[in-house]
Amino acid sequence: MAPSSPSKSPLRWLAALLATSSLLPAAHAQYYKIDTPDEIRQSARTLAYDMMLYYQGNKSGEIPGILPGPPTEHKGDYYWWEGGAMMGTYVDYWFLTGDPSYNEVVKQGMLHQVGPNADYMPPNHTASLGNDDQGFWGMSAMLAAENKFPNPPEDKPQWLALAQAVFHTQAAPDRHDETCNGGLRWQVPPTNAGYNYKNTIANACFFNLGARLARYTSNQTYADWAAKTFQWMWDVEYIDHKDWRVYDGGHVEHNCTDINKAQFSYNAALLLHGSAFMYNYTNGSEIWKERIDNLLTGILRDFFPDGVAFELPCEGRQGACTADMLSFKGYVHRWMSVVTKVAPYTADKILPVLRTSTEAAVKQCTGGETGRRCGFYWSGGVYVDTAVDKTSGAGEAMNVLAAVSSLLINEAPPPVTNETGGISKGDNNAGSRSRGPSTPLAPITTGDRAGAAILTILILGSAIGTWSWMSLGD
Ligand SMILES: *[C@@H]1O[C@H](CO)[C@@H](O)[C@H](O)[C@H]1NC(C)=O
Ligand SMILES: *[C@@H]1O[C@H](CO)[C@@H](O)[C@H](O)[C@H]1NC(C)=O
Ligand SMILES: *[C@@H]1O[C@H](CO)[C@@H](O)[C@H](O)[C@H]1NC(C)=O
Ligand SMILES: *[C@@H]1O[C@H](CO)[C@@H](O)[C@H](O)[C@H]1NC(C)=O
Ligand SMILES: *[C@@H]1O[C@H](CO)[C@@H](O)[C@H](O)[C@H]1NC(C)=O
Ligand SMILES: *[C@@H]1O[C@H](CO)[C@@H](O)[C@H](O)[C@H]1NC(C)=O
Ligand SMILES: *[C@@H]1O[C@H](CO)[C@@H](O)[C@H](O)[C@H]1NC(C)=O
């Protein structure tokens, strides 16, 4: 996933823009209706169709599973991880609406990207392989197991085993070290820029998978890792001890105390979602309830002003939201809706907000030639043309699809476990075939001089790489 460094000079351009509406195209009437379950299903169907137009992966000569990209190779706006996030969005779309139209496309994409060791580390994407990127694919595989998405053929890796593989590679010793007292680094290969950054999203994905694997398999080992990882994020104060704001991360050379305080909505929402699974797995423990309550209060306060999703660190400043950030609202809606299934006492607080937010989302889907294209600025109430701000791409379409589909959560069954109807087969050895592109850092001995020099160069190189991206927004 690309670095999450927000611009620091607010332009308040959008407010100005909206005040001078002559810059806006003639408004179309609202296209989408979401008052009844039938209207919601119909709207979701059209949104799913339109979103698929961004996906080229099932055309001949194209690569299944990914959206056009990556930007570093000038192939399109989207990094590898976002294809995984898209697959998850369609696994939920099918689960919530019952429409199987895209199931084959999704299954093909999810299986094409598993990599040679069936753990979502395909060599094509080593250059952008963060623990979070791998984690997003793993979470979509986990979701397929929880939603009873049709199983892959028997000679192919199974959904639960894929989620386990991702988790097991991330729990292996070579991904953990003593800097900052623990935690996962952002990047997997030590040569990648950002290897010296320990961030919330990498650890939140790992935590989230651990919580869900614990609930699905009833294996306490996963729960122990999840609890330990949450505790680490708390101890380094990536979660603010006073008001539960969730921050982005810090660097190992500063013992993770140089905290980048950007608050991205998906970090907080992923911790909430994982905490709800831990709450459920522990039969309603007080400690996880307290975490749910505090995170939820913070999320509603910071990311839903007036009950409408708002991407705090970048929204409202022209060009400040990257393609990654332009997709976060959809995950937040989907994860929060599932929280109401595994921690049902939260439903009264969450569901009304998901509704007001989705109403605002569809209100601004009046763009393009179809008159139903969606943008990103939900609280503004009007579609902002691409000529003004490039905010109507795949992420923006996926957000609204996710929000509308998730309105059907009340009718849906809860995520299954192995004991309550699950049909996906696991594998306790999944992920053991590769231990990542990195090898464990052995103690340096006199025989290792050349190796040590190379290591120093690598660390210096990655520090410089990281410094330049962290400074981009200054
Ligand atoms: C790709 O998938 C879409 C959606 O299911 C379908 O309409 C289209 O025909 C598919 N294209 C190919 C070449 O299979
Ligand atoms: C890796 O990239 C090459 C070149 O773009 C492509 O042909 C191949 O299908 C990709 N492999 C996977 C598993 O996506
Ligand atoms: C690093 O921070 C942790 C708390 O996160 C603290 O326990 C530890 O002593 C610090 N280490 C150094 C070398 O400052
Ligand atoms: C939750 O309750 C069930 C049924 O009483 C029990 O089998 C299970 O061990 C409990 N789980 C935990 C983590 O305490
Ligand atoms: C756990 O989730 C199930 C649905 O899977 C729900 O019925 C149950 O009430 C939840 N447990 C708690 C403690 O909320
Ligand atoms: C999962 O459930 C199946 C069928 O109910 C059972 O055969 C299997 O042993 C269970 N697996 C685990 C890991 O509990
Ligand atoms: C629990 O999961 C871990 C990691 O996959 C595995 O090593 C262990 O054997 C599992 N325990 C049981 C009882 O299945």
Image: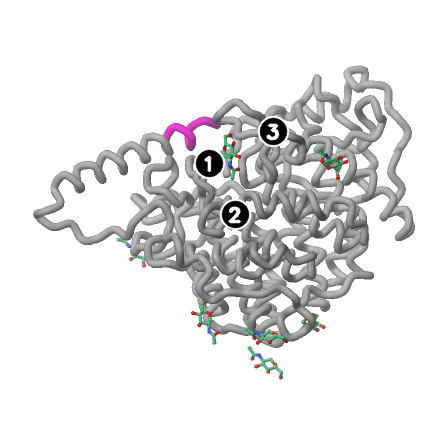
Q: Position of residue 1 (x, y in %)?
A: 50, 39
Front position among marks 2 and 3 = 3
* The magenta stretch spans residue 471: yes
Residue type, label 3 = Gly
Look at mark 1 in the image and give the residue it sits on: 124
Residue type, label 2 = Val
Is 282 placed above or below 439 here? below
**CB-based contact (under 8 Å), mark 2 and mark 3:** no
Is 367 placed above or below 197 here? above
> Mark 2 to mark 3: distance in Å?
19 Å
* Disc 1, SS: helix
* Disc 3, SS: loop
Horizontally, residue 286 falls left or right of residue 13, namely: left
Horizontally, residue 251 falls left or right of residue 287, namely: left
Look at mark 3 in the image and give the residue it sits on: 61
Q: Position of residue 321 (x, y in %)?
A: 59, 31
Query: Does ligand 2 reach within 8 Å of label 1's beta carbon?
Result: yes
Q: Earlier in the sequence, mark 2 or mark 3?
A: 3
Look at mark 2 in the image and give the residue it sits on: 114
Q: Residue at x 67, y 22 (%)?
A: 389
Q: Position of residue 22 (x, y in %)?
A: 81, 15
